[in-house]
Image (cartoon, grey):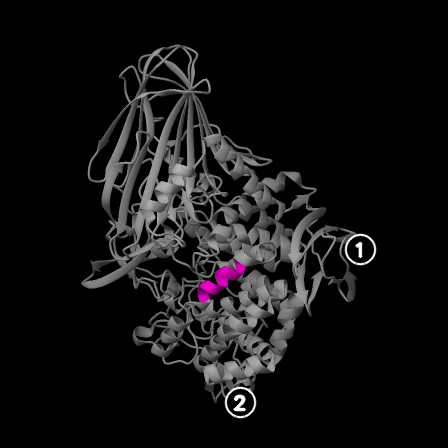
């Protein structure tokens, strides 16, 4: 993709000009991190205002604030925007301090080098006095030492000489201001404890979150060189309550190249193996080498990461998009995340979208991690396990047994979904019932099963995974109510992935039937019911396969009755699904009785998203219409290969054909607005075996996510990390057809003609392998000389892959 806006090629993404209106989106997309902290790509000379939003976020650093809204107290636990480590600018001969917004830009280029995770900015500018300067900026957040960040400016004086003044500081005067629709909420999460100089060249700022009482210590060191030689610049420090700034002065000759180097260290009281955050930040900075040395070890750390993410294909122009999506996952969820007790965020950690809460996006990201970084994947599941007791409490409050995991989670595992959402179009507060998306429990069970299949980590299953799956199954068994008229179990009062339908319209035949006060929720969402049935079946199978001793321990721990597994199986086999006369699966019971919505006519009238906001502003509601925000029922074919889904439906007592499934997806596509970045990914995966041409169309559209404002998919509030993981998931599990069946890695590809061949690196049962798939052959090579053998297969063929050997399967050509 190459436009006036962006050029993406090989390992780099480059913007060739400065666009103040697009700066916020680029700051999120070009943010750099290491799985411990993430720093937005705001210009170091800028402060927070309409154009720029500097933001630094420590993974999992939350604070809770309350705001009075509509005469009720609304609590929000938010990812905290931490003190800004970036402030760095300069001025020439007493002129204005440099800002890209205040000079004539003769050339401007901003580049993200994904191979080494370095952000670059190249500027040739002329100031108000006609002085021309070239600026090269390099920035990184160390993957080798997670508490360190580096920033370097290289200035070349092209036609001037004289006094150069440098301003380098730390700014604690920050708030959470990144998301406009959160503007009514309180946003001051920090208080500054103190600022001080810790040496002639180093500064310190210590702050604390107001409610969670997390200490944040930030230190920074600034040095200057000319032509590679250290310069003893004149220094002066100025400080107030929330800021501390060091000013440096030196003389510069025409043609000189001045390097300004800033190294920062950040620690919090959440860190392990430290006595005090401020002491740790000072020590880390004192031991830190120079910019170039730190950059080199950072480069080596990324080189190791990419070794685990091997990918090549005939369609070379597609590779940079996959690299971008892998890069964003790697810098948000790394080995440094493993001990932080955090989940997988939908928008990365580079913005304040959704307050930094954890949803279900692990569904789309988790498979990438499980096949390459199993320890990191395991850590995200342990985040859920540590909140299992809170999920039990939520289930009990809902009148159910087992564990009901929250739709939105943060530090404690309580439900964080706000009951009110602010509509920017109307200025009204809208009721938010999306907390009824209980299907998230099935996704947690699905991720556990996926992890164990890929890694064969039976110890995790026995100690952690089994308990979670059993408690999730218990929740579904108690949530499902038997309807004697239908002779089947029903699940009422839920919200499906669509999210637009959180209750029935007042004039609907099923209005008020959900069982919730106020009528919140809809009944028998097909996706929710099928996933509940799958979870019940998975729990029974898994429990029967556990070692006898562990089964007895769990039975005692959970007071598990002997007849419960049989009861789960009965609920599974008799779960109700709304099937239309044509054989298609209805999105939820009564969906077909809603009013038609004319999507094309709407889009001709409105050139913006958020149909729900628009209709509410017009006195209407999306709940009245056959209109979906995103793919819903089609998710089933994203998660399961067609044959496996048909078998599951058959076990539930429904004789659905492959044609019925295809027509179900086509029907849903017709009424889906694709307002979620996940929607096209789901349709791409669901159609991979059924309609390759349209699958590839949706896939290509999803690949451009976040890259261009013209696509109306970028955001200054974060990136679409779930969708990025989803593109890798479609490639891996749908186009390459990689799945695990009976402890065997099976590859049944459905490559679109455009892909021709793909080579991908994976780890299965601890063995690194390389798979090459083309239109006529599958080649699987063991990358290790010493390891256990593994089983690999294609269709009904299964073979043993021994260390250092290769297995080949020939594919039948489709007519």
Q: Position of residue 685 (x, y in %)?
A: 60, 57
Residue 566 visible at all: yes
- Which numbered dot is residue 563? 2
Q: Position of residue 392 (x, y in %)?
A: 40, 75
Tag 2 near tag 1, CB within 8 Å: no
From the image, give the main secondary structure of the stretch colored magenta.
helix
Residue under circle 1?
Answer: 808
**Frontmost residue, 266 versus 674:** 266
Please, what secondary structure does the residue beneath circle 2 have?
A: loop
Determine the residue located farthest toward the left in the rendered image.
Answer: 71
Left or right side of 130 for 570: right
Q: Where 713 falls versus 128 (above or below)?
A: below
Query: Which residue: 70% across, 42% down?
Result: 314
Q: Where 486 falls versus 687 (above or below)?
A: below
Pick the quarter of the image with the N terminus.
top right
Asked whether 380 falls inside the magenta stretch, the response is yes
Left or right side of 322 for 112: left
Hey, which quadrant is residue 620 in on the image?
A: bottom left
Residue 112 visible at all: no
Q: Position of residue 430 (x, y in %)?
A: 29, 60
Asked whether 16 falls inside the magenta stretch, the response is no
Query: Which residue: 36% across, 64% down?
Result: 412
Q: Which residues are magenta?
A: 377-384
């Amino acid at each position: 993709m190459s436009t006036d806006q962006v050029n993406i090629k090989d390992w780099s993404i480059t913007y060739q000009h400065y666009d103040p209106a697009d700066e916020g989106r680029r700051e999120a997309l070009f943010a750099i991190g290491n799985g411990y902290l993430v720093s937005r790509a705001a210009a170091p000379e800028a402060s927070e205002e309409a154009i720029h939003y500097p933001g630094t976020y420590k993974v999992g650093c939350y604070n809770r604030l309350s705001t009075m809204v509509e005469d009720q107290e609304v609590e929000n636990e938010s990812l905290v925007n931490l003190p800004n480590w970036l402030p760095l600018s300069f001025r020439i001969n007493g002129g204005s301090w440099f800002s890209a917004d205040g000079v004539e830009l003769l050339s401007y280029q901003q580049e993200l080098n994904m191979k080494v995770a370095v952000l670059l900015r190249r500027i040739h500018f002329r100031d108000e006095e006609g002085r021309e300067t070239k600026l090269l900026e390099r920035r990184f957040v160390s993957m080798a030492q997670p508490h360190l960040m580096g920033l370097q400016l290289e200035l070349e004086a092209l036609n001037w000489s004289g006094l150069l003044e440098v301003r380098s500081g730390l700014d604690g005067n920050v708030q959470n201001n990144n998301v406009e629709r959160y503007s009514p909420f309180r946003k001051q999460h920090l208080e500054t404890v103190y600022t001080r100089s810790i040496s002639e060249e180093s500064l310190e700022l210590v702050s604390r979150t107001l409610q969670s009482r997390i200490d944040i210590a930030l230190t920074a060191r600034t040095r200057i060189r000319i032509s590679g030689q250290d310069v003893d610049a004149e220094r002066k420090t100025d400080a107030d309550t929330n800021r501390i700034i060091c000013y440096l002065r030196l003389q510069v000759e025409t043609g000189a190249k001045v390097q300004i180097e800033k190294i920062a260290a950040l620690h919090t009281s959440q860190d392990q193996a430290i006595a005090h955050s401020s002491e740790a930040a000072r020590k880390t900075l004192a031991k830190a080498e120079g910019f170039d040395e730190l950059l080199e070890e950072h480069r080596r750390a990324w080189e190791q990461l990419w070794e685990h993410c091997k990918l090549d294909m005939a369609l070379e122009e597609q590779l940079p998009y996959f690299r971008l999506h892998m890069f964003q996952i790697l810098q948000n969820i790394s080995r440094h995340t493993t001990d932080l007790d955090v989940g997988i965020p939908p928008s990365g950690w580079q913005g304040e979208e959704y307050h930094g809460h954890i949803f279900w996006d692990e569904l789309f990201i988790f498979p990438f991690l499980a096949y390459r970084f199993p320890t990191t994947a395991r850590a995200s599941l342990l985040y859920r396990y540590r909140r299992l007791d809170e999920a039990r409490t939520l289930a009990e409050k809902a009148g159910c047994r087992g564990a009901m995991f929250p739709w939105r989670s943060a530090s404690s595992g309580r439900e964080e979904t706000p009951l009110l959402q602010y509509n920017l179009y109307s200025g009204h507060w809208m009721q938010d019932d999306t907390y009824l998306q209980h299907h998230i429990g099935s996704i947690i069970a699905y991720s556990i099963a996926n992890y164990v299949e890929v890694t064969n980590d039976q110890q995790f299953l026995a100690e952690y995974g089994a308990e979670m799956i059993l408690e999730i199954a218990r929740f579904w068994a108690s949530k499902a109510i038997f309807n004697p008229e239908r002779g089947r179990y029903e699940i009422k009062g839920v919200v499906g992935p669509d999210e637009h339908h959180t209750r029935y319209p007042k004039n609907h035949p099923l209005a008020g039937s959900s069982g919730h006060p106020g009528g919140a929720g809809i009944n028998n969402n097909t996706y929710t019911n099928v996933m509940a049935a799958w979870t019940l079946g998975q729990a029974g199978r898994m429990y029967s396969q556990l070692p006898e001793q562990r089964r007895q321990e769990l039975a005692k721990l959970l007071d598990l009755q002997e007849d419960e597994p049989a009861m789960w199986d009965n609920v599974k086999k008799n779960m109700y699904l709304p099937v239309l006369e044509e054989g298609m699966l209805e999105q939820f019971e009564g969906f077909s009785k809603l009013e038609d919505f004319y999507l094309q006519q709407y889009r001709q009238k409105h050139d913006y998203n958020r149909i729900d906001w628009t209709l509410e502003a017009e006195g209407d509601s999306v709940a009245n219409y056959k209109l979906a925000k995103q793919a819903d029922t089609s998710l089933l074919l994203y998660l399961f290969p067609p044959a496996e889904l048909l078998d599951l439906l058959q076990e539930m007592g429904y004789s659905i054909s492959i044609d019925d499934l295809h027509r179900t997806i086509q029907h849903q596509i017709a009424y889906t607005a694709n307002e979620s970045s996940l929607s096209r990914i789901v349709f791409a995966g669901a159609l991979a075996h059924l309609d390759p041409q349209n699958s590839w169309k949706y896939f290509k559209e999803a690949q451009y996510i976040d890259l261009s404002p013209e696509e109306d998919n970028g955001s200054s509030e974060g990136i679409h990390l779930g969708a990025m993981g989803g593109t890798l998931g479609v490639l891996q599990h749908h186009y390459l057809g990689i799945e695990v069946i009976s402890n065997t890695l099976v590859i049944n590809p459905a490559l679109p003609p455009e892909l021709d061949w793909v080579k991908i690196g994976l780890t299965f049962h601890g063995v690194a392998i390389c798979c090459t798939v083309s239109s006529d052959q599958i080649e699987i090579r063991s990358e290790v000389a010493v390891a256990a053998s593994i089983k690999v297969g294609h269709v009904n063929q299964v073979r043993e892959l021994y260390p250092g050997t290769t297995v080949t399967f020939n594919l039948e050509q489709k007519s």
